[in-house]
Amino acid sequence: MPHGDFPLPPSYRPHEVEKAVEEFWRKNSIFEKWKSWRGGPKFTFLEGPPTTNGMPHVGHIRGRTYKDVVIRFYRLLGYDVWVQGGWDMQGMPVEWEVEKKLKLRSKKDIEQFGLEKFALECNSLVEEYLAYWREWGTKRLGLWLDLENAYETRQPHYLQYAWRIVKRAHELGLLTEDYRVLWFCPRCETSLSDHEVALGYDEREDPSIYVKFRVEGGVDEYLVIWTTTPWTIVDNEAVAVHPDYVYAKVEVEVGGRREYWWLAEALVPSLMAKFGIKTWRVVETKKGVELAGVRYIHPLAEEMPERASRPHQVVTAEFVTLEQGTGLVHIAPGHGPEDFELAKKYGLPVTNSVEINGIYNELGGRYKGKHVYDVDKEVIRDLQSKGLLVFEEKIRHEYPHCWRCGSKLILRADRQWFIAISRIRDKMYAELQKVNVVPTKLRDRFDIFVQNARDWNISRSRVWGTPLPVWRCKKDGRILVIGSLEELKKLAKELPPVDDFKLVHRPWIDQVKISTHDCDEWVREPYVMDVWLDSGIAWIAAVDGENNRDLWEKLFPYDFVTEGIDQTRGWFYSLLATSVLYTGRAPYKNVLIQGLILDKHGQKMSKSKGNVIWAKDLFEKYGADPVRLYILSKVAPWEDLSFDPDEVKYVIGDLNILWNVVKFADTYMSLDGFDAEKYPLSQWLEKGLEEDKWILSELNIMISEFTNFVKNFEFHKAAALWREFVVETLSHRYIRLLRRRVWSEEPSPDKYAAYAVLHDVLKKVLILGSILVPFITEYLWQSYVRKYEKNAPESVHLAQYPAAGSYDKELINIYRELFAVFSALAEARNKAGIKLRWPIREAYVNGAKYAERYTELLKYLGNVKEIKVGRRPDYLCVKEGELEVCVPDKIEPELYYEALARELIRRIQVMRKETGLEISDEIHVVVETNSDDIKKAVEQYRDYIARETRAVKLIIDAVSQGKEWDISGEKVKIEVRKAQA
């Protein structure tokens, strides 16, 4: 019997419990038995792979707890579960950590360090952190994922599915190379996709400047524009106005001279006030379309001689608004998508003088060799020295940053590779409508992003990633797309002497030589692919779906995925895009969107702020179960969670109550020789009392509601319900009622009926709770359930989910009212300063439907000699809803001695526990005191004290070895010794 290895110490100790349970699972291969398929219906989970580039923190633990809850729930329901783990092990996140470790500051530094050495460092880093993720992000959390068969995005058999996707896109005409304006990280020296950009928006302060562009041929006449990126003025090619807006030529007085500024008429008053110009007047107005064709002189003509050599003019554009700025928009086609499209429309030059690293090239004139962020400031100074800076201020706005290194992004035109998502987004949206996205209030965010999805920029100028499988013929520029490692080897005329792992990574893949009958030399495009494509193919690559078709078809589409809210534009999106492209179907049925994790002050966690809470620290301090239950209870999964470690102790308190309830059951069942198979509930329930049927009704309602909550991903409601049942319904109510029955030494039928009921309740409570707190429930299952039920399943996690039986609604209403009366009575006692242990002569109850019928029960619960129905205004009264309870405001003298006797009983019981006595052990008690009241209480209630404490001898005498107590202001020394047999 396993219970021998699972003793029940006086209180719950999370670390000891979890260590013992982990060892039990390992020795008995419980996980292997749990995950094995038994021929039932399938529930398939697809792991959103964490990047193993750092330590797991509480944000990761939150999401991984939700995953475990759902998987365990469906396994209990009888499903065969698919629980393959997965690790994201490539891409910019990994490179960024390695660069910090090696103190590399740029791509040039990486090249000098050596691409081969750098790739090996990246692989070493993810290998190092993988150990922490297996231990602290999975095993110690109690998350049951199949780690032995976990997929890794770095492995050849996995990443070649990214090649398959790209080849399929090529075959469908969706793979394109194009010159477009894209977001780039100058620090990482690579472009980013739209969904990567969406991950990095943050508030920042930037310059906000208003600049005069001199009108060609005009006398002191200017176009006034506004920008928050002064560096882009270097590549200005036009000024845009809205064709239908009215523009005003405003005469202004600045610096003692008159000038004429063109501004949107509607904005003139507010702009004059902003600029501090008191004397001004509108001398002329024109519609935007009439301004079209007006030429101006480039504001940096002297710094950029090449720009001065060609004309610049006003054009019209529908995208111009009056929400910010002047109504005239500075157009730099090399640095803005709308500007770029406008340039194509009007045949404007597309000038990009900024390289991928943010440094100006020779087109940058005097700014050549300088960084955009430095040029930002320099341009402002140059404009000011020329008298062209109208106004300068700072603006706080949302702006995209690199989602990994945090650098401010820049827009620049470049040639990159794309998958034409714009041509399949309608199909993606239609498939997404078939998916259950939880919560519904957040699905709009996902829907809108998909509806407006632009072509996916998949090429990255980096090292550690899946190589873009596109080769170009050196002779004529044709392209060759390779869809597998096998295909690569067939086409290769020369391969580097390395294994497959290195072969599918840079720089080794670039050493492969390919020639064909129609092209002597094919050269690979020098890119790796967007890391989101890596994880986005997990729906098929994780199980090598083309080579394991039968298995894959059983899994796909997956029943459940869950990640953070940012993944609507990240992993959820990339899964959808690749799956629809390859199969025409969404890869998942249910998507749970998680909220953010914040610190206790509601601030985002970050290493720079020092407020990150690491999983290892949490578990070492509190244990996994308390952390899990705290996360599950605090807020809905989709709401932001402010994590306060100090609040975890309240959860430990609730789990300790569960522990004590089981210990209570074990103590008395052991004493009375209870056996669940000898006293089956089905045969003994009719011998029980009404309160037994009540607790079973409460249990059945709880099971029903708990089940629905978990199915709807309302884990916060399920956890709160389970905790409330354990603490309030079971411990504070049913066990309170039960104590008077189990303390009796009479082997009455109703006592064994109560044991049968309590056993059934505890067993089902542990099964339900096992999805929330898998360690303590397993421990109590082994120490208690299997002790009294020899044929119980080997593990609580191998048990069958309990069905919700019928319930007696009237009985539930009765007992809920009775406990509401008791609650009001306890509050009234508290206000009167009369402890619950102290008896009172009477209490009046008003507004309770069932009080008169249940006076005996209320007398027991409230420690009252007599319950009367009605009001007693001269007593201390407390209302609770429609109920009112009135009690005396002080204890009556004749009951005082009984109260003191109860105080003595309480202290003796504490000492019994501290001494380690068994419940059946008889004792000798010596009481020493100078208080006549205490002495009188002992004399008057000697038999009562002896009966309640199992004392065969109770005397008042000097105490040689004992403990001193304060009872109602009187000093009392008590000695407790085990009676000799």
Image (cartoon, rainbow, N blue to C red):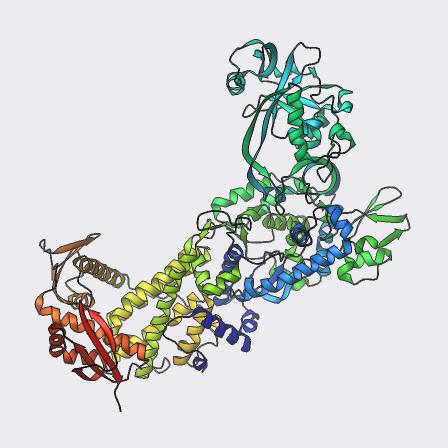
Position in image of residue 128 (x %, y %): 64, 62
Residue at point 57%, 71% (across, down): 36
Question: In the picture, which quadrant includes the C terminus?
Answer: bottom left
Front in this rendered view, residue 669 or 675: 669
The x, y position of residue 562, in whole percent, is: 54, 54
Q: Is residue 338 visible?
A: no
| Image coordinates for residue 53, horizontal then vertical, percent | 63, 56
- Against 345, residue 864 (above or below) is below
Residue 102 lies in quadrant: bottom right
In the image, 608 versus 460, the foreground residue is 608
The tally of labels here is 0
Which image quarter holds the N terminus?
A: bottom left
Can residue 535 be seen by looking at this rendering?
yes
Residue 976 x, y percent position in the rendering: 25, 81
- 840 above or below 972? above
Q: Is residue 355 left or right of residue 903?
A: right
Q: Is residue 225 left or right of residue 418?
A: left
497 up-or-down from 285: above or below: below
Residue 885, located in which quarter of the rendered image? bottom left
Q: Nearer the viewer, residue 445 or 900?
A: 900
Name the residue furthest bottom: 981
